[in-house]
Every structure is written in structure tokens, then in C-alpha cells.
Image: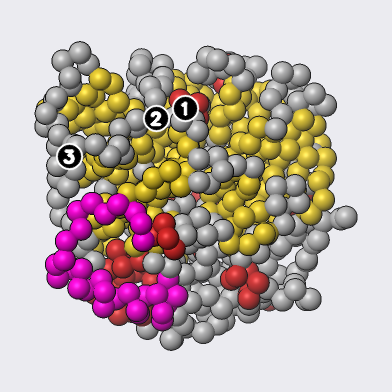
Amino acid sequence: MQAKTYHSTIPPKLQQLAKLPLPGKYNISIPTNVPRAISIIAPPPPTHEVPIVDVDDTVTAFWDYQFLFVSQRAEAAEPINLRLVEGEIPLDFPSGTYYLTGPGLFSDDHGSTVHPLDGHGYLRAFTIDGSKGQVKFTARYIQTEAQSEERDPVTGEWRFTHRGPFSILKGGKMVGNTKVMKNVANTSVLRWGGRLFCLWEGGDPYEIETRTLDTVGKFDVIKDDQKKNSDDRGFKVDVWGVAAEILKPILYGVFNMPPKRLLSHYKIDARRGRLLIMSCNAEDMLLPRSNFTFYEFDSNFKLLQSQEFIISDHLMIHDWAFTDSHYILFGNRIKLDIAGSMSAVCGLSPMISALTVNPSKPTSPIYLLPRLKTKEMRDWRIPIEAPSQLWVLHVGNAFEEKYENGNVEIQIQASGCSYQWFNFQKMFGYDWRSGKLDPSMMNLKQGQEKLLPHLIKVSINLEQNGNCKKCCVNDLNQWNKATDFPTINQDFCGGKNTYVYAATTSGLRQALPNFPFDTVVKLNTKDKSLHSTWSTRRRRFIGEPIFIPKGREEDDGYLLVVEYAVSTQRCYLVILDSKLMGEKNVLVARFEVPRNLNFPLGFHGFWAPR
């Protein structure tokens, strides 16, 4: 079966928009000889190659950024052999499938655009056969309830009807539109117990057929009896509990929000063979109180334990960590924006504008929640205040070491940014008023780099009685460029590790010095002076790297990363030898995705060995 492809020409109105001055610091006139890339507001891209033109990098940088978020309406339902363009797959490569999910569509056929976080989920699968040296590629849209409603199955035409948390509609219903919880299953992917799932921040995961990528349907991982039978810790009846009861009928009924909202980030305890997932309550985003429930499953999705923790703080959690004894939350403090709430309810601004960051304290709360149902020496309700104000984005790992004197040291490896930089309404530089992307939001002036995402190490020393003796926050390594998406050898997750891999920037692109990322970095956590990198070619970017173990040594394996060649509108699957990072022969192989299947930036991936 051939890939389904839909083509469109650029309407005259969009051609006129392309001639407008660029926003922000990119407010310059575009020379007539500059190829006019298609921004997020446009239909699918043309299939011809976009030439590299020697012009001011400020201009090409703006358009390169737009090309990273171009909608892809084509699907590859049948496996396609990817062309090997460099290197070869070694015979000892562990065969398996690399699943990558992310948004695939940003604009409909009626004038509406959506934020990248609200784009419909587009699942990509790279099946690697080490013995044959082949990579097969498939790509399908996840048939969520929102996708089924917004796409005409006969004509292929799209009309957005759901607002989503980060967008507003221009070609659809704005005022009175309560379709806020647009579960697009675009954030992360998981294979567990022989089953494949795509997850989103705030709803049930969608199960996917592993071979065809057909959508099976929603998977109710937190069944009703599990929601009721979790052990409550910290529950008490107070004014906020009463407020929560008042809000529930509105949130559950009018806005159709699930009572328990699953987070898109899960954890796998490889040593115990357990899947750990976490949920929060729908009303948490409006009240200065947070309800977090943790669930642990075996490989057959049998619930082994669940615990609910009620915290007297208004927090937003995207990623978290675990150790043998604790669930660890690095709290991002938020508060309700009254003016933004009124505007959002009226449909005049995205729903996320109801919230804003809360930098009222110079410290960051870290909650050590007991994973084991034993008597705790310290009161987990009282956070450990890290002496640094950081908004944590992603967690690479956490582990604890116990000493002979009974003291315990907990270490957390994560990416964090400044409250001064983080802005709910400007993530990825998306401007919901114009529907365009402004890369200046993601790229700051020289001297402001510390405000951007970078890797940190948090060390917590607990005395035998549970009291915090010391807590400090330091750079994970001497690598000081903007960095995110930390990952490790997953066999060491929850245990002591030496190496962290992440996506970062070379800093060589003058107009895009910080983001998008173009480099993979390998960091040594024991010797901060040691780091090694691999960078892409000119006008190419990368997404999240992922580690594939091969042997028993922690760094014995390969790194997979997708390379986005925006200047030629092509994507490549790149395989790197993790032990050879920094060496000339680090690149093992590069495979090319057909141009008609070129896809936008992906979010998170998963490696499933055969």
C-alpha cells in the first residue's frame, strides 16, 4: 500500500502573510531571493527541495524554525525500507523498534492553527533489523476521539473543533467552547506487557496495535475501583476540600475533564519489573492544593499498589523521579491568574492563560513521598526547600545511597530553567494571537543563557532521623550550554548512574544560539570536566536522544536520534556509538526518510527490543 498523501497550494492570503515583517527581534524585511518557507499557519509543504541560499542568517533562521513545525498529512500504513545514506548497521546491533510520537498537524482547512502541544498525535516507528542492516518505517495518526471528530474520513479535510489547553480557534467556535481537554496522545509512547500506548498530559492513554499502528482505543489504566481504593495520605476536610467538591461537577460535566489526569511521563523500575505511573486531580489546577496518586503495575498490568498524597501547595508537575524508597516531586509553583481565567473561559485566550508561574519564594520545594508503606521518620508533607528557584522540565534519573551511620544521600539529575524565562503562553515561541512561531522566545541574548534549560544535580543529605542535613543544587557538568531531554541507560533507572545523555546546542548558529538543538552530549556525572558531543550539519536540528543498551557496561550501546534537515525538508534516523562520543567515527549509520513523509519535530520516544 502506498503512503496516503494530500497536497495543497499556498493560498494568496498566506503568500501575503509571508511578506509581512518578522516578529520580535526578527523584525526585518525579507529579501526577494529568500525562499519563502511555509510557517505553522500553512497547509502541507511542497515536495520540491528548498535550496540553501547564502543570506543573512537571521532570515534563514526564522524560516528554518518554521520548517521544523510543518504539518504532515501523509501516513505510511505499510512498512517502507529507508535508504541508507551513510555507514552501516553492525551485526551486533540489538534488533527492535524505536517508537517516536509528537504532533503531526498544526493547521486545519478553515483558518485555525494550534500550539505544537495541541497538535494531533503522529506516531512514527523505525523497526531495525541488525542482522539484515535494514530499517523499516511506518507512520500513522492516532485515531483519538478528537481526531475522529475533526477529520473528514472521506475527503481528508480537517476542521478544528476542540480548543485544547494552549490554543484558540479562529475558524471554529470560540465563545462557549468547552472542548478544552483535547487528548491528542502526542507526548510520549510506552510499550509494556506486549502492548503499545501513546500518552498525553491529562487523559487516558490510547492503545496502538504494535505491527500496523492501528488505534485500538482508549485504555482505562486507572479503573474506577483503583481510583477509589488508593491509600490517601494527608487527607483532611478543609475549605479547599469543599471548594474541590463544588468544582468537580463543572470540570467533570461541563468541561468533560477526567477526575484523575494521567501525566505523560511514566517510570520503569527495571530491577523490580514494574511500571510506575502518576496522576493528578482535575481541580488541582485551580486550587492551592495538589493531589498526586502513584500506581505500580506488574508486566500484566496487575495493580500492585497505589498511594495518594495530598499536598498543601499549588504545583504543576510534568516529570518526576523514583528511588527504591521514594517518589520524588520537584515542585513547580503556580498560581491562578484571575484576569487570564476570565479571558480563557470566554474563549478569548487559551485555557492555559488561567495559570501563571509563582516566583514568590526564592527556593524550590522537593517532596520525598514514601514509596514503601512503612513508618516514615520524617513528615513528607514538609518539603525540602532547594536553595535555588528552578522550573524543572525533565528528570533524567534519581537514586539514593545509604551510609553506615544511617544517613541517606539522594541525588536527582534533571533539566531546569528560570521562572523568569518560563511562560505558559510562549512555549516553543508560539503566538496564539497570530498563529505564528517566534524563535526569539527560545533564544536569549548572550549572558542570559542560565535562564534557559540546563542540566542540574540536586543532592539531599538526610540524617538517620529523617531531618535534612543539607540540600544543594549544582550544575550536573561543566557543560554550560542550553540543554534538555536528559536520558540514561534505562537499566540504571532508579539506581546509581555515571552517564547522562541529552540534546543540546553547539552555539554556532548566530541567530539560533540556544534552540532548536543540534547536538547530542554525553556527560560524566563523576568527573564534571568530562563531556563529549556529536553535532549535526549546517541548518539541521535534532530531537530527544534515546539510549539502546548492548552490553553490561553502562555506556556500552547506541544512541538513536532523529535529525531534521530543514533546508532540504528531510528527516534522518541517526545511530551513534555511545562509547565513541566525541570521536570522528562516532556515527554508525544514517537512514533517510522519503521526502513526502518528512515529519515535524517529535517529543518523546521509546525503544522496544525485539
Highlighted magenta segment, given as a residue range = 228-257
Task: Residue at 25% x, 20% y: name it.
Answer: 402
Is residue 410 depicted above or below 276 in this figure?
above
Position of 246 with respect to 118 (left or right) is left
Tell me, yes or no, whether the highlighted magenta stretch contains residue 561: no
Could you say which disc has been placed on residue 125 in the image?
A: none
> Measured from the top left, where is residue 148 in percent x and y?
65, 72
> Measured from the top left, where is residue 255 in percent x and y?
42, 77
Residue linked to disc 3? 384
Is residue 274 depicted above or below 338 in this figure?
above
Residues at marks 3 and 1, CA–CA distance in whole angstroms: 28 Å
Q: Look at the image and tell me whether residue 399 can be seen.
A: yes
Q: Quadrant of the C terminus?
A: top right
Outermost residue toward the right? 1
Labelled pair 2, 3 in contact (Cβ < 8 Å): no
Residues at marks 2 and 1, CA–CA distance in whole angstroms: 9 Å
Labelled pair 2, 1 in contact (Cβ < 8 Å): yes
Q: Which badge, 3 or 1, comes first in the chain's sequence?
A: 1
Q: Nearer the viewer, residue 494 or 42?
A: 494
Residue linked to disc 2? 494
> Measured from the top left, where is residue 478 in percent x and y?
34, 23
Residue type, numbered disc 1: Arg
Q: Quadrant of residue 25?
A: bottom left
Task: Residue at 35% x, 16% y: name it.
Answer: 526
Number of numbered callouts drawn: 3
Q: Give the crowd class for mark 3: few <14, some 14-19, many >=20 residues within 10 Å.
A: some
Q: Nearer the viewer, residue 17 or 154?
A: 154
Residue type, numbered disc 3: Ile
Residue type, numbered disc 2: Gly
Name the mark nearer the viewer: 2 or 3: 2
Residue linked to disc 1? 271
